[in-house]
Image: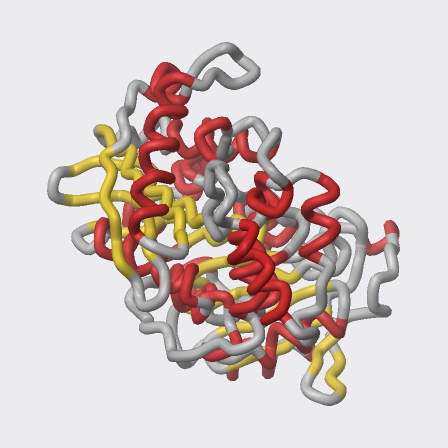
Amino acid sequence: MLNGWNKFAGTVTAVALLCGIAGTASADSELRRALSKVPARMAIDRSGIAASFVGLSQLRALYADDLVSMGLRVSLAGNDTMKAFFSSPGTGWEDDTGLKRDEIASFTDYGTPPRAVVLWRFAGPGVVDPFVKGLGKRGFSQANGLWRNGEPMKIDFTRRNPNNPFLGPLGRASMIVPFQDGMAQSPDPQAAAEAGAVTVQTSLAALPPVEAALDGIEAIAAKGTIVQAMVLTPAMWLQGADVGELLTVPPTIDMKALADKMVEQAKKPGTPNPIGAVIADVETKEPAGSGVVIALPYGDCGTAEMGARIFADKWKSAAGRDGQTGAQRTGMEPAVTIHQGRENCVALMSLMGASDAKRGNPALRYIIGAIWQRDFKALQGG
């Protein structure tokens, strides 16, 4: 096992970045626009998952509004809102929400239940006002900019409805905060209010490592589309004590002293870990194909090149719990490029193959499944 300080040097960098976010991320993709409403603090979330994104507009374009085919492509439909979107029969969704399915551009979720947040981004600027006006008819009341359809955090099985995203399988009420082009939904009023107040400058998308990762992914997907994505934090590949020591540090303390110590400790031998990761399901047009782009941000390009070599080697040689390597499971070899960002350098691994409408994206399913089990060897340093 690597030296503890060496292992999470990237984590301190991520924490330190929260103290002074500079610049404004561009809005080149629905993924970036969605992450521009996720709080920057999620970059150090101890669960290892900063946010998960599903682009519904992109799915509709690919599958001509075929809800069944759209659902088969999605590998990140873990929250109750997303499940209701795909399971609600007939006009049930529109009756319960006041929204047509094609009025929703994307869902992005972050945080840990029951205080998790789902961000709804709408497909057009004229959707918010009619939606808000209809909330009263659907059992919501409003106070201080927040709409609620019951008592916060309370479970009420007499109201349960898995097909209604505002109640779900536990009958738990939703707290809703509308914003310019969407809304934040959570059982927790504080979490919903925080999401509603996030600006581009204070968002996950504006953090330099995430911004650089998005730049690289968008460049690869320039002639295609980003269908879904997951943003990981350094906690995904750290061990228990390492996570506890750094990820619980509030970003208001003197981070410079800690960062200076990390610079000194990082000189010791060891395999570098990235400052988080963005894993994207990408559909390309020229050449036609689908696959996964994995963006791993590092502090400099020399380290990014080393990280890319480690990933490519482990993809081909490190077997998971099923005894197979990533290359054996998918039949794909990573194409590696290095992208220089504003403050960080990103190793980009593209795993692309022919599109298969019936199978969706099997490479993404394999990678996401291995991540949930903490068994994705290619992302583990050392």
* Residue under the image location 59 percent in, 71 percent down: 256
Side of 276 where 92 appears, left or right: right
The structure residue drawn at horizontal position 80% and vertical position 58%, both measured from the top left corner, is 172
**In the image, what residue occupies the spot 36% across and 46% down?**
303
Q: Quadrant of the image for the N terminus? A: top right
Q: Is residue 266 visible?
A: yes
Q: Position of residue 46 (x, y in %)?
A: 67, 51
Residue closer to the observer: 90 or 8: 8
Foreground residue, 199 or 146? 199
Q: Is 327 rendered above or below residue 252?
A: above
For the view shown, which residue lies furthest in the top direction?
323
Which scheme is used to colour this image of the protein?
A: secondary structure
Horizontal side of 59 relative to 249 (left or right) equals: left
Q: Is residue 2 above or below residue 138?
A: above
Please identify the quarter of the rendering in which residue 335 is found: top left
Camera-side residue of 53 and 326: 326
Q: Position of residue 349 (x, y in %)?
A: 30, 39
Quick one: 87 or 310, which is closer to the camera? 310
Q: Position of residue 356 (x, y in %)?
A: 28, 28
Which of the 4 quarters of the picture holds residue 63? top left
Residue 110: x, y in percent? 61, 57
Q: Give the quarter of the image for residue 164.
A: bottom right
Looking at the image, residue 254 lies above or below residue 56? below
- As drawn, the residue found furthest toward the left would be 286
111 left or right, relative to 9? right
Residue name at image x 27 percent, y 25 percent: 333
* Residue 63 in view, yes or no: no
**Labels in figure, total:** 0
